[in-house]
Image: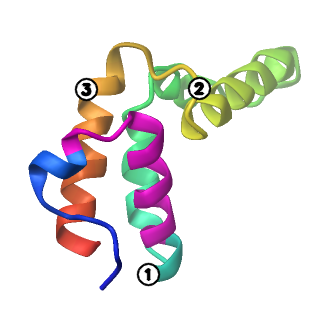
Amino acid sequence: MTDHPTDLAALDALSTEELRERAFAVARRERDLGFYWNVLRHLPNSDEAEALDGAPNTLGVTVDEAVALWRQLTGHGYGESEPLLRAAFIDYLQKHG
């Protein structure tokens, strides 16, 4: 168990970035790749990146999409997915924190 709170009110009071950092720390500790995959699936650019086939004429787009996903995964630019991601981070911390 960690020193971090796991009750809903305390977690909901945290910024999305703090929730992300805490959830990612738990997932790293637990080696929970499934959690990361779930988060990636909910990021705004995940659909576009999944549709790309990696053909040479899409390489620039693929790199751009990968960078966009990385920025979102590291807390920059959640867009409309932020409420869903906040809920996922809070749920994960309550179950595993």
Q: Amino acid at mark 1?
A: Glu
Disc 2 secondary structure class? loop
Majority secondary structure in the magenta region: helix
Residue 42 image offset from top left, x and y in percent: 37, 34
Query: Which of disc 3 and disc 2 is earlier in sequence?
Result: 2
Q: Which residues are magenta?
A: 12-27
Q: Amino acid at mark 3?
A: Pro
Disc 3 secondary structure class? helix
Q: Amino acid at mark 2?
A: His
Q: Report, in whole angstroms, how far the alpha carbon at label 2 lies from the one at label 3.
A: 14 Å
Residue appearing at x 76%, y 19% in the figure: 64
Q: Is residue 87 left or right of residue 82?
A: left
State the mark number for residue 30: 1
The reply to whether dot 2 and dot 1 touch (C-beta < 8 Å) is: no
> Can you say whether 32 is above or below 72 in the image?
below
Query: Which of disc 1 and disc 3 is earlier in sequence?
Result: 1
Q: Which class describes the residues within 10 Å of circle 3: few (<14), some (14-19), or many (20+)?
A: few
Name the residue that disc number 3 marks.
Answer: 83
Residue 77 image offset from top left, x and y in percent: 54, 19
Q: Is residue 80 left or right of residue 17?
A: left
> Can you say whether 86 is above or below 88 in the image?
above
Residue 80 lies in what quarter of the image?
Answer: top left
Disc 1 secondary structure class? helix
Q: Is residue 81 left or right of residue 60?
A: left
Name the residue that disc number 2 marks.
Answer: 76
State the mark number for residue 6: none
Residue appearing at x 26%, y 74% in the figure: 96
Residue 13 part of the magenta-drawn span: yes
Query: Which of disc 1 and disc 2 is earlier in sequence?
Result: 1
